[in-house]
Image (cartoon, rainbow, N blue to C red):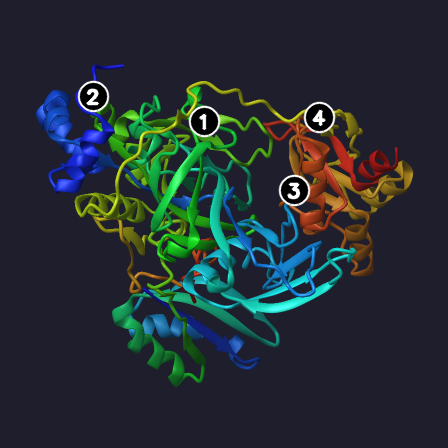
Amino acid sequence: MARILLTFSDKQIYEPITSQVILESGVPVNILSANVTPRGGEILAEIEGRDVDKVLTAFKKRGITVSVQRKIEVDRDKCIDCGSCYSLCPVNAIAFEPDRTVVFDVEKCVACALCVDTCPTRAIRL
Amino acid sequence: MAQNIRTVAEINEKIRKGDAVILTASEMEELVKSEGAHVAANEVDVVTTGTFGAMCSSGAVINIGHTDPPIKIDRAWINNVEICHPGAAVDLYIGATLMDPNRAFEYGGGHIIEELIRGNEVELRATAYGTDCYPRTRLETRITKDDLNQFYLIDFRNGYQRYNCATNSRNDTIYTYMGKLLPNYGNATFSGSGSLNPLCNDPDFETIGLGTRIFLGGGQGYIIGEGTQHDPETGFGTMMDRGDCKRMSPEYIRGAAVSGYGTSMYVGIGVPIPILNEGLAEKTGITDQEIFTNIVDYGVPRRERPRLRKISYAELKSGQIVVNDRTVKASPLSSLKGAEKIASTLKEWIEHAEFYLTSPVERLPQKATLNPAKQEAVIPFVEGLTRAAVTCTEENTVEEVAKLIIERSVNHIIVVDSQGLLQGIVTSWDITRAVANGVKGLREIITRKVVSAFPNEPVEVAARKLSQHNISALPVVDTKWKVLGIITAEDISKLIVR
C-alpha cells in the first residue's frame, strides 16, 4: 500500500475531484483523514502500490498537489532485533524471521509512525 | 540435589584439553527432549544461556585519576548528564537511567557507557567546594576509556528470571518502562528470554552465586551476589554483577531511550551452567511451555497492578496472545536473537578454552523477602476528595446549563444519560463560547471524550491526568461509567496546603 497526501487549493475544494479520480481510474482510494476548510484542504489516502501512477496522474491532471508519503527507514547498525516495534504495527509490516531477526516490509508500511518512538535504539526513522 | 557425576575442576580440565561438550540452552532443550535427561547428563558438560534486555539498575563506576591541584568532586556531568558521585574525590557512578535534561528520554547514562566502550570521547565537567587538601573547585576535560583508571560495570539488578507481560486497560496510549502500550488492551509487551534465561536454567541456584564467571557485555565478568528485589520464591530471581567495561563490546552494551519513561541500557549476559548432575540436565532442558508469567494491567499505576491471567513464554514468543477474548500482538522487549547469539558466543569461548568455569563462593539465596517501601504518610485517594457532581442531560439548552453554573457556582457540568452514565462534560468556558457564537443547543458543545478518574485511584494519579491533559476537573466514575461525583484541581490543591 502507498500513502498519498493530496493538497487542495481554496478553489479546488468545491469540485468532487476525489470521486472523479476514483471513477476515472477505477482504483479504490481509501481516505484515512481529511481536513477541508474554506481556505483549502488536505486528504491523506491509501492506495494499492501498483495503482499509484494511475491515481497520481489523474489527480495531477486536475491540478492537485500530490506527494507520496515516505516510509520507515531502518538503520540496521542501530537495530538490536528486540522487536519492541512489532506489536505497534497496524499492517503487519514488522515480523520475525525464524532466527528472531526483526524484518521490515517497507512495501506494507503505511508510515503511521506508531513504531518510531518505541524503538529503544532509535533505529527507525520516517 | 541429585548425585554429582562431575566437578567444575574436571570440566575445566576437559576445556583445557578441548574435550568438553558444550551446548546452548536451546540445543540442550532438544537433546533432553529426544534422549532424556540421563543421556544428556552423561554427554554434556556445560550448557550456555543468554539474555539481552533493558536493565535499568545498571551502571558503571569510573575513576578519572587525580588532578593537580586535586579536586574532591561535589557534582559532575558527562555530556551534560549529571552523574552520581557516591565515593571519594574522583570516583563517579554513571547510572543507566540518568538523563541529559536537554535531551530528556533520549540520551542518558546508558548512552555514555556505550560511547565510552566504543572508544568515543566524552565531555566531563565537575565542580567542588574546595578544601585544604582538595583546593580545586572546577574541572572541564575530555576523556576516553583509555584515560580512566577503572571502568567497571556494576549492575545492582540484572537478568530477571522472568518478568511481567504488560498491557493497558485505559482508553489512551501510555508510555511505560514496558514500552508503548496501546489503548483498550491493543497490544502487549514482555521481557526476558524465557528458556534461554540464565536463572531459569538453574532455578535452585546450584551453580550460580558470588564468583560465578559469566559473559557480561561481550567481555568476561562475575556475578557478585543476588540482585536487588531478588524474589526467587515467586520465580523472580535476579543477580548483581560486575565486569571490566574496557573489554566489553558495544554490540552487547547499548544505551536505550524508552519514550515517556527515561533512558536505560541493554545489557547482554550469558551464564554457563556446569552439568554436575542429572538434575541440572533436566533443569537446563526447560522449555518455554514450562515458564509462566502474568499478563498485568499497566493502565493501573499502583504497586499491585491487576493481573489478567497466567501466560507461558511459548505463547508470548509466538507473537500473538489472547487478552480479554481478543488476539493482540505481543512485542518482546528483550532481543531474543541477541540472547541466542550470547549463548552461542559463550559456547565458542569455552570450546576454544578462552573461558573457564568457576564454582561460586556463595550461592544465590533461594529465599528472600521482598517488602514494600515503608510509607509514613497515608496516601490520599480520589474517593476522599470526590464531591457531588452537578449534572445535566443532552436535552438541556445552553441557557439552562448557564443558569445551573451560576446557581451552583461550579465550572464543570457533567452530562449523563437517564441511567446516570457518563456522556460528556461541559465547562463554563464552553458555555461562554456558545453564547458568544449564538449556539443554543447543548449537543454541539459537549466534550465527548472525557478523561475521568476512579474512586480507588491515588489522588496523585488524578493530578497527573489533569496536568497531562491540561484540564481542571475529572468526573469520578465506577467501572460501568456511572458518575459518582467530580474531583477538581481546586480540591487537590487544598490537599497540598493542608
N-terminal label among 4 and 2: 2
N-terminal label among 4 and 1: 1
Query: Hey, which quadrant is residue B6 in on the image?
Result: top left
Q: Residues within 10 Å of mark 2 (few under 14, many from 20)?
A: many
Find numbered disc 2 in the image and state the secondary structure of the residue it sits on: loop
Q: Amino acid at mark 4?
A: Gln
Marks 4 and 3 on same chain: yes
Considering only vertical position in the picture, is B403 above or below B149? above
Find numbered disc 4 in the image and state the secondary structure of the residue it sits on: loop
Name the residue tied to disc 3.
B451
Mark 4 and mark 2 residues within 8 Å of each other at the beta carbon: no
Q: CA distance from mark 2 to mark 3?
A: 58 Å
Q: Chain of mark 3?
A: B
Q: Amino acid at mark 2?
A: Asn
Frontmost of labels 4 and 2 is 2
Q: Chain of mark 4?
A: B
Name the residue tied to disc 4.
B375
Q: Amino acid at mark 1?
A: Leu
Q: CA distance from mark 2 to mark 1?
A: 38 Å
Q: Residue at x 43, y 22 (%)?
A: B365
Question: Can residue B286 be seen in this snapshot?
Answer: no
Considering only vertical position in the picture, is B388 above or below B449? above
Q: CA distance from mark 4 to mark 2?
A: 46 Å
> What count of labels does the image hold?
4
Query: Hey, which quadrant is residue A74 in on the image?
Result: bottom left
Whole-percent x, y for residue A2 in the image: 34, 67
Q: Chain of mark 2?
A: B
